[in-house]
Image (cartoon, helix red, strand yellow):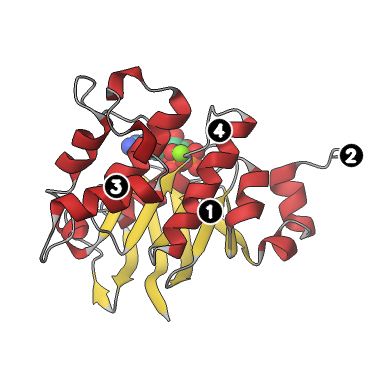
Amino acid sequence: MNILTVEALTKSFKGLRAISDVTFSVEEETITSIVGPNGAGKSTLFNMISGYLKPTSGKIEFKEQDITNQVPYRVCRLGIARAFQISKPFPELSVRDNVHVASSFGRAGERDPIATTTHALDICQLTSLQDELAGSLSIGNLRRLELARAIAARPVILLADEPCAGLNSTETRDLTNVLLQIRKAGITVLLVEHDIKAVRRVSDRVIVIEAGQKIADGKAADVFTNQAVIDAYLGTSTE
Ligand code: ADP
Ligand code: MG
């Protein structure tokens, strides 16, 4: 079942069309990745879905509800959470307390902060680090903490913008494992990621955006062998 639908979405900044007539839908409990060169419009797309930017035209539907012009906190209460690349935890609080604080926000409805925190730490493989101070974490662990804080908001959909950026291959592997755990926990993931290996590993579906337009959409294996994608995004080099 489709849980999120983006229809003819367009965002113009003065003269620039950052996103132009983009349409796609996201199936429940899958990982959908959005890839494309720098400046393609990926973050702009995320900003519209999460309510930080108002679309110029088009429509966004979440669970058949029109959320096109919703403000961020309402989008969050409906169950769309966002993990940021630059994590800003409370450095003097433990990992567990940081996640616990996040569990007070997010999707509306009944909450059990202790159970939610324990579950989020478990999914993000942070249980053994729960008593460490957030300020002492390595970048790889910080990224997982950022995901844990987003999960603590009990989202239906998680938007993650380049969670693997700047991570080494071991940290990237750990993070992709966490993304797979998140999907297993029943959360739908919408991912923007540059690391193609990571994208291929986790994605049920890949959408390619170039210069604000969707140029491909399908299974990873098909999308990355598509000539238009190779030309536009991967380059025409021997690689
Ligand atoms: P990506 O995340 O794919 O790298 P962005 O969505 O950040 O791309 O940017 C898409 C285009 O929109 C870029 O040309 C960028 O300079 C422009 N842009 C993004 N945000 C703004 C803004 N707030 N005001 C003006 N231009 C913007
Ligand atoms: Mg971006």
* Residue at 55% across, 29% down: 167
Q: Are marks 4 and 3 in contact (CB under 8 Å)?
A: no
Residue 151 visible in the shown view: no
Give the amino acid at mark 2: Thr
Mark 1 and mark 2: Cα distance apart in space: 24 Å
Earlier residue among tags 1 and 2: 1
Which circle, 4 or 2, is nearer the viewer? 4
Q: What element carries label 4?
A: helix
Give the amino acid at mark 3: Ala
Identify the residue under disc 4: 171
Identify the residue under disc 1: 34
Mark 4 and mark 2: Cα distance apart in space: 28 Å
Identify the residue under disc 3: 150
* Residue at 20% across, 25% down: 90
Q: Is mark 1 on a helix, strand or loop?
A: strand
Quadrant of image for the C terminus: top right
Q: How crowded is mark 3: few (under 14 residues within 10 Å), some or many (20 or more)?
A: many
Front position in the image: 61 or 109? 109
**Is 169 displayed left or right of 63 in the figure?**
right
Which circle, 1 or 4, is nearer the viewer? 4
Q: How crowded is mark 2: few (under 14 residues within 10 Å), some or many (20 or more)?
A: few
